[in-house]
Image (cartoon, grey):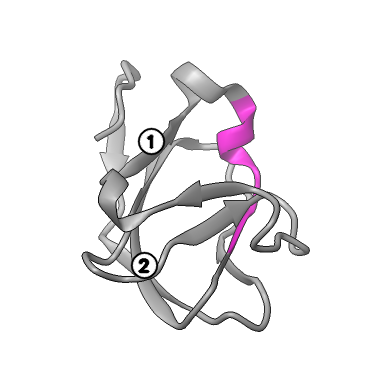
Amino acid sequence: MCDYKRTGARHSPLRTADLKPTSAVPIAGANDRRVALTFTPEVGGAAFVIGTLPEVTLGTGLVVVPTGGSFCLSVETHGDLVKQPWYAIAGSAVTIAFVDTTEE
């Protein structure tokens, strides 16, 4: 999971998003209170790509692979990038899970 040292942080419920190979989908809107985003690929599922632009493609963005385990972005490590809106796309249909951690 993420390493963050903020006080008053809380986890959102585990969320899921159904990704398609045809176009990126919005998965987390911009949030100034966000301190971390943790993405978890489906075991045995397809790799997927996340990015902060709606035009994210399979050739751009950050790749999350099933064999790599959870992928975490935190304010501590990545700064305000975490607070941006996030989009995702996959090479084949796949469901991803993620936790959006915010500060109270």
**Rendering coords of residue 9 (x, y %):** 31, 32
Q: Amino acid at mark 2?
A: Ile
Task: Check residue 36 for magenta coloring.
Answer: no
Which residue bears the numbered disc 2? 96
Report the span colored magenta.
80-88
Looking at the rendered structure, which numbered label has been put on residue 104? Answer: 1
**Rendering coords of residue 98 (x, y %):** 35, 56
Element at badge 2? strand
Mark count? 2
| Distance from the alpha carbon under mark 2 to that under mark 1 | 25 Å
Q: Is residue 59 left or right of residue 98?
A: right
**Rendering coords of residue 64 (x, y %):** 43, 51
Which residue is drawn at the image coordinates 64% and 52% (left, top)? 85
Residue 94 position (above or below residue 89) = below
Depth check: 88 or 60 in front? 60
Which residue is drawn at the image coordinates 45% and 17% (left, top)? 76
Query: In which quadrant of the rendered image does the C terminus lie?
Result: top left
For residue 75, say whether it is visible: yes
**Within 10 Å of the Cα at label 2, are there few (<14), some (14-19), or many (20+) other Cα atoms?**
many
Q: Is residue 14 left or right of residue 83?
A: left
Residue 71 position (above or below residue 85) = above
Element at badge 1? loop
Which residue is drawn at the image coordinates 56% and 36% (left, top)? 82
For residue 32, say whether it is visible: no
Query: In which quadrant of the rendered image does the N terminus lie?
Result: top left
Residue 17 position (above or below residue 57) = below
